[in-house]
Image (cartoon, rainbow, N blue to C red):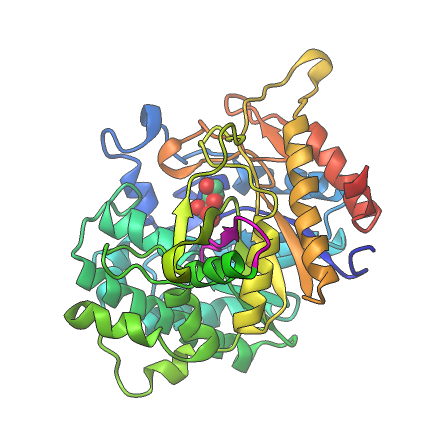
Amino acid sequence: MSFPKDFAWGAATASYQIEGSPTADGKGLSVWDEFVEREGKIWQGQDGKVACDHYRRWEEDVDLMAEMGLKAYRLSLSWSRILPDGVGAMNEPGLAFYDKLVDRLLEKEIAPWITLFHWDLPLALHRKGGWLNPEISNWFADYAKVVVDRLSDRVQHWFTINEPQVLLDHGYLCGRHAPGDTNSFGSVMQMGHNILLSHGKATAVIKGRAKKTPICGWAPVGSAARAETNSEADIEAARKATFSVDTANLNVWNTAWWADPVFLGKYPEEAYEQYGALAPKIAPGDMEIIHTKPDFYGANIYTSTRVRAGANGEPEWIPHPDGVPLNTYDWAVTPDSIYWAGKFFYERYGKPIVITENGIPIVEWVGRNGRVRDPQRSEFISTYLLGIERVMKEGIPFEGYFYWSLMDNFEWQWGYKQRFGLIYVDFETGKRTLKDSAYHFKKIIESDGAYIHE
Ligand code: GCO
């Protein structure tokens, strides 16, 4: 069995992680530009001021994408490059950058999949209260308008906000990401509601104004539980675990809280009640705005938890087996996680699945003859893709797979320590080298997936 002919074989990046040039051509600052200046926040005091220098080397980067045969590219836009203050005056050179990039991608027959926001909030908006300001969803919708009016004659695939869970937990609860805040759980829940409203209003803008029929997705963190065995009881426990909301330990790490409102039009009821005064305030009409029913479910999947049925069939989280392979982040390599995630997400939300991020950081370097030998990454890609093949055999529609990341980049608080790319980047010189895994992925793409069995 092969993958569909029009399957979106792609790679993903995010603006702050690759672009550099934080003040070029009228760009305004984002919370990340400010955060990296603070002592002790980023590993070895690194920052994204140059990063992959993609803002200046974008043509070369698109050529490399073409060389590896990518059919799609998921990128995020820097809000403050386009609207330096987050609202108001538009910065033409900032928007022109993305405009040229889109043209170049299309010339190479690579479909741009645009994420409006991947965590680099304009600093000016943060200073006005950021995600806690009730106006934020209107600001975000206005930003969406500017982008959609300019790019939607050519761009068809859209995301609003990437991974609300990481954004809120790292940025606003424990403060290890920009803007480095440590808010109360109740206010973070309210921010979360504003994020969902922002998603809703921006999606309405995209659907209402796009010149080319838009295809809209939603990409929360795609954590899913894997069943320990194929027994009905374990599978049911894993399903339950995948959508459970841990209201006792106040955290934002779950799927249902972030996906149910968008796909099903309501917060998980039991959890909403259990949160009590900590639950966000919902104004009349909010849930209708948030309930955008996206065209596909975007799942960012790297690893998964392992679950079996405990007493009364309730989920019991168990450790990975002894000796499970770990990447340089210590995340377990669990190829069947895409199978379980795809199955459970489709059952609950009924939409085709796109893997919007999946990747592995490993130890690697430019070796003999200028080659980067990264067989673990090739194996990782093939085996995770086997999970897609397996779940498609059960009739579950999958529309794409985006490897994270196109190139090694600025990995947030870890700076340049973690290499995820298909392209090796020498951060001293900017030199790019296609890794062996890039050629492996190319063969997979050229064979419509069949090469995963080689
Ligand atoms: C995320 C982000 C990416 C990360 C990647 C590797 O999922 O955290 O979308 O920006 O770089 O996931 O950690």
Q: Residue 362 sits in which quadrant?
A: top right
User: From this viewpoint, which residue is outermost toward the top?
Assistant: 368
Relative height, residue 94 to residue 19 (above, below):
below
Asked if one can make out residue 383 in the rendered structure from this viewpoint, the answer is: yes
Residue most extreme to the bottom:
284
Q: Can see residue 150?
A: no
**Magenta span has 222?**
yes
Q: Residue at x 54, y 46 (%)?
A: 13
Task: Give residue 381's position: percent from left, percent from top.
Answer: 66, 40
Location of residue 287 with respect to 51 vertically, above or below? below
Would residue 287 appear left or right of 238 to someone viewing this image?
Answer: left
Q: Which stretch did the figure color magenta?
A: 220-231
Horizontal side of residue 144 vs 64, given as left or right:
left
- In the picture provided, is 229 more to the left or to the right than 284? right
Total labels: the figure holds 0
Q: Does the magenta stretch include residue 326?
A: no
Picture coordinates of residue 291, whole percent (x, y): 44, 79
Q: Where is residue 278 in the image (x, y as percent from the top left)?
A: 18, 67
Q: Could you tell me which residue is drawn at 51 percent across and 44 percent down? A: 303
The relative height of residue 277 versus residue 104 in the rendered view (above or below) is: below
Q: In the rendered image of this protein, does residue 237 appear above or below residue 270?
A: above
Q: Position of residue 442 (x, y in %)?
A: 77, 40
What is the quadrant of the C terminus in the image?
Answer: top right
Q: Nearer the viewer, residue 184 or 425?
A: 184
Could you tell me which quadrant the N terminus lies in? bottom right
Magenta stretch, main secondary structure class: loop
Query: Is 429 or 443 nearer to us in this picture?
Result: 443
The residue closer to the viewer here, 119 or 48, is 119
